[in-house]
Structures are given as structure tokens and as C-alpha cells.
Amino acid sequence: MTVETARPERARPGGARAYLALFKATGLGWLRDRSQVFFTILLPLMFMVLLSSVFGSTDSTVPRVLEVGEAPVLDRAEAGEFEIEPAASLDEALTRLEDGEADAAVVQDGQSVTIHHSQANSTAGAIALGKLSALVDRANVDRLSAAAPGEPVLEIDTAAAEGTETRPIQYLAPGILAWGIAISGVFGAAGTIVDWKRDKLMRRLRLTPASVGNFVGAKISVNLAVALVQTAVFLAVAALLFGLELSSWTWFAAPLVLTGTLAFLAIGVVIGGIAKTGPGAAGLSNLVTMPMAFVSGAFWPLALSPDWVQAMSYLSPMRYLNEALQQVVVYGDSPAAVLPQVGILAAFAAAVALIAWRTFRFDEL
Amino acid sequence: MKGENPVTPVDGIPLVAMDAAIEVADLRKTYRGRRTGEVRAVDGVGFRVEAGEFFGILGPNGAGKTTTLEIVEGLRKPDSGEVRLLGRRPWPHSAELTARIGVQLQASSFFEFLTVTEQIETFARLYGASRERAAEMLEQVGLAEKAGVRCEKLSGGQQQRLSIACALVGDPELVFLDEPTAALDPQARRNLWDLMRAINADGRTVVLTTHYMEEAEALCDRVAIMDSGRILAVDSPAELIRELDAPTRVTVAAGQLDEDRVCELAAGDEFVLDGDEVVFETRDARKLLTALASEGALEGLAVRTASLEDVFLHVTGREWRE
């Protein structure tokens, strides 16, 4: 029994070549996994359609206003500006407001106009309140102009004011994007770790000349590339179909989602280390991402949330990603303005990665 | 640990690197589980595999074969003991050593959603081998026709073949195969045997774990019989059986011979007369068979010589369980 001693020349194994091969293999696998594509690309878009129709419906409808007794100020309203119904008493009007049958009730006593706006549907109530205030202002301006005809007055153009108000898509888009980045990071990493525990691929790769670092690096690179594609597709759809106006700093969303993805991947690795099965990993990921999303201000403005939610939001990395995306993409602030958020995300990523490293049981792979 | 010096004597056991593909001395590994308590998975295992040899580790499930193999490959660290692969320690990871080794793990480990070709080409690049080499390997394991098929669509036997192709793509000197035929149907198992013989015939050292007696007997130059974390015997299958010095069991249908004649033919050896058959346990099978033939009493004839199964029974004191 002899072993051939002359071995054919071959390229030095490992290194960049191995990294590229692994990147290609994991990337192809990702592209062919339809559930992944659905989860990262389509699901956030579906959420945007859903949430923008829920929030968007309120500003297209005409405020329903109850006229308690006689409220002459309402006579000045333009046709179609309000849907006015009479109410016999304030009590009756308040009951109907509570039931959501109307958005506001108006009581006029001489020069004093009292507006009761709906708490049952606070957004619609607030819109009704705004329009009614504008109506009262208009009445005042007309009176003052009549009293002093030569005096110039400031004109309020309510139509123009409406055009610049924050439309739902402007805070929904960054929020849903941040959420999409979070779930693909957390679920992706947790699922991958559980897969590795099951299929022992990691074990097999440890016995090749490529280092484990090559493989982990390739896997993280694929996730980062996916996050970039996800962001590009999402913002393109938001801009083209939902009329989101993108600022000239929008490109800075790239480093933001990359930093965010690192933080969410680290969370996913911790979860994958604890979970034993795929469903277990998915359940735990939900348990972490759901509260994180709810307290982050991703789906509705934090200002509308109770104090304790606002306090909790500081613990959610999604808050910082959401804030930074909103400032840069929607409001056009320069990247310098969101450096604190980037710093916190990076620190968060580093801290969770350290926890993952310390708690992970590598012999399970 | 002196790392680079391949011939460090360990605990007084001299390890000679020359021509040995694998040297293992006094490996121990204990698992501590919350429920199971302490399990000595590997309990003082030592063996040596020569370059070019086909070496088998035979034992029932749970004997410690896979743990031993994983320690030897460098996937696990032993509690104590020493391993040399091609003269080097397998731990920590070294690209130079892993480039010379091919591994097929018990579970087929593939990249998800890739085709057969993509799979083996990925492994080829990890080993610095060419695409031509990858295609050649598919040819050798008989998967060339399946090149465009997704790996998860392959049958169990085909997956094992692909796994072996991936192990061979780096042109290794030393190949580890961990129960490649487990859970395969007999036909697929025989096909794999031919492949494993060919790998060894190419001059590669092969280490195979199996819990199939006949597989070890058919393929291995030498076999280590393992049970409860220990190696109980190591030798060639033929030598192990010969040393056992067990009688040959000759069975014929009853009714062809009367009891006196059976007694006479047994000539002092053991025999059993049970209903429809007579079983002789003879040391001289040739003489007995000649006598039976001349009596014309060969109906229902079965001759069974001792096998590794008897060796296992002898060294462990208990029946073989698969």
C-alpha cells in the first residue's frame, strides 16, 4: 500500500476565494428560498399598504360635526367642508362622540365657541379640531376686516397648510422599514443558527481549509446585502406608489440599515443559541421583535403613546433606526444630525454581540 | 504543547510519525448531562492506522465511535489523550492539515437550495480544487446525471455519495467516513461499498465507522471493535475470527439421519437435534461435510462459519444489537 507523493499543484485554499465561494453559495440559497424573499421584501410592503390605508382613510373623509343648538359660526363653512348634523343637547352630542358617530361637537354661546373633539377616534378628532379652529379664525378675520376695511390682515390658506402637514406615509415608511430590517435580521440569524445546529454544515465546514470566520463573514455579508436590497426596494415602492418624497440625504439610509442589521443579527444569534427548533426560534423572535416594534414608534408616533411606552422606547434599537431613517430620508436632515442614533445602534450591536459570544455554546453546532 | 514537533512522546507512549496516517493514544471524553449524569463516551481509546490502510471502527450505536472520530478529526477536544493526523495535531484548525483530509459526516451537511453541481463546486473552491476536479468527482460517485438537481431532492444513498464526493474533491490522503451506509437499502449499500473500495484502491487511507458487521468484514483491512467507549479488539477481520477458534455450524434437515447416526457423525463434537433440523458444531467441517455427502443427507444444508458477530459476542459477552 503506497500513497502517491507527487501532488498536483493547486491554488492555496482558504482566504478570499473561500469567502467568495461561501458568499455565493449562501446568497444563492437565500434567493431561492421563497419564504425569505416574502418575509423580507413583500411583508413590509404589505404592511405599508395596510397601515397607510388605515391611517390614510382619516384625512380623506370630511369631518362630521355636531351643531349643538345654534352655532352661527358653522354657517360660514364652505359647502362640503364639514358634514354638519344638529344635536339637541350637549349631552346627546357627547354621547354620539363617544360612540364614534361624529368627530367633533360645536357649542356657540355668543362670542364663545367651544369645540368638543372625539377621543374615540383621536386622529379624526384632531383633524376636525384643526379645521374648526381655522373656520373660527376665518370668521374673526372677516369681522375685523369689516370693522377696519383699510387694515391689511394675514391670510390663512388652509389648502396649502394641508399640503405640508405630515402625511401618514411620511412616518409610516421609515417605521415599517425599520421593522422590516429588524425582523429579517432577528429571524434570519435565529433561523440560521437553528439550521446549523440541525444540519451540521458548520461542523463540515470547520473541517475544510476555509476558516469558520470566512463562513460567518460570508453569512453576515449576505444579510447586509439583503438589508440594502430590502431598503432600496421598499423606498422605491414608497416613493413611486405611495408618494413618499425622498430627501437628497436618502443614500445615508444605507449605513443606517447596515448598522441596524448588525444589531438585529446579534439579537438573532442570542435567540438562536437558546432555541432548539425552528418554530421555537420563530416564537422567541416574535417575543422579542413585537414589543420592540410596539414601543419604538415605528407604527404610530411616539408622541401619541403613553409615558411608559416612551420611556421603554429608549431600550428598543428599532427606535433609533426609525428616528434616524425618518430624519434623514423624510425630513432631509444631514447625517451629522443622526450621529447619536448611529452611535447608539453601533454600541447596541457591540453589546449584544458580546452577549452572544459569551453565551453561545459552539459545540452545539 | 510543542505544536510543530510531530514526534513528541506523550505520557511515555512513543508516537512514531513515520508512515502512520493516524496515531491515537489514550483518548478520554466524558459528557456531563443534567439528566444522564456522567457518560464516559470515550474511555481510554488508542489505535494506529497505517498510510493506505482501510481501517474500520465497528460497534453498536452509542459505542462511542462518532465521538472518537470527531476527536480524531479535530471537531471535539478530548478531556485527555493525544491525536496525530499525518503527524500533526488536529487542533487548533490548520488549513495545511484540513487540505489533506476528506470528511463525510454522519448527517449529510449541504448548503440549502443548491444543486449538486453548485454544492460540490463550492466545496471544490474551499479546497482550492478546480471545477474540472469537481465534475470528475461527481462522475466517480455516479452522480453526473444528477448534476442539476437540488440536493434535497436526492435519495439517501445519492446524498451520501455527494457527501463523499465533497470529501474527495480536495484530493485528500486521508478520508473519514462516519456510518455512510446507515439507513440505506441493501442495494445502495452494496453500491457504496464498491465506491469505498475504489477510494482505498486509489491509495487513500480510509477510516470507516459502521455498525454493520458484514460491512466491516467486507471492506476493512483492520477493524477495531468498540463498545461502551472502549476498543476491545483490533485486528484484521480474518485474524479476529481465527483467534476466536469457533466451531463451524453445519445444519441439515432432520429425518435424513437417525439419532445414532447423528451421534456417530458428530464424533464427539456438539450437536443439537431440534424437531426439523440437526445442527452440528464441528472443528473439522470438511470431514463432516464429506460424510454427510456420502450419506446423501444434504437436504436443507447450511454452513455457517464464525463471523465478527461471534467475535463481538466473545469480547463483549453479550449479543450484537444493531
Image (cartoon, coloured by chain):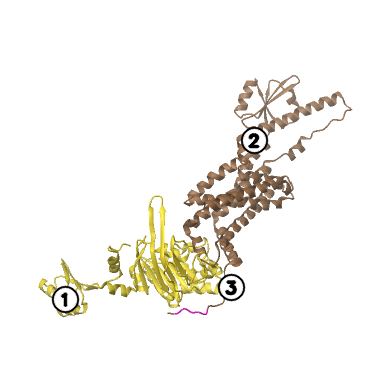
Chain colours: A brown, B yellow
Residue drawn at point x = 16 percent, y = 80 percent: B294
SS class, disc 3: loop
Chain of residue at mark 3: A
Crowd tier of the residue under label 1, counting other residues whose Cα lies within 10 Å: few below 14, some 14–19, many 20 or above: some
Residue wearing tag 2? A304
The percent coordinates of residue A128 (x first, y second) are: 69, 31
Q: CA distance from mark 3 to mark 2?
A: 61 Å
Magenta residues, start to end:
A2-6
- The residue type indicated by label 1 comes to Ala
Q: CA distance from mark 3 to mark 1?
A: 68 Å
The percent coordinates of residue A345 (x first, y second) are: 64, 48
Which of A62/A29 is in front? A29
- The residue type indicated by label 2 comes to Leu
Q: Is residue A200 left or right of residue B214?
A: right
* Image-quadrant location for residue A83: top right
Residue wearing tag 1? B297
The percent coordinates of residue B292 (x first, y second) are: 17, 77
Quadrant where the image shows the N terminus of chain A: bottom left
For this orientation, the residue located farthest to the right is: A150
Nearest to N terminus: mark 3 or mark 2: 3
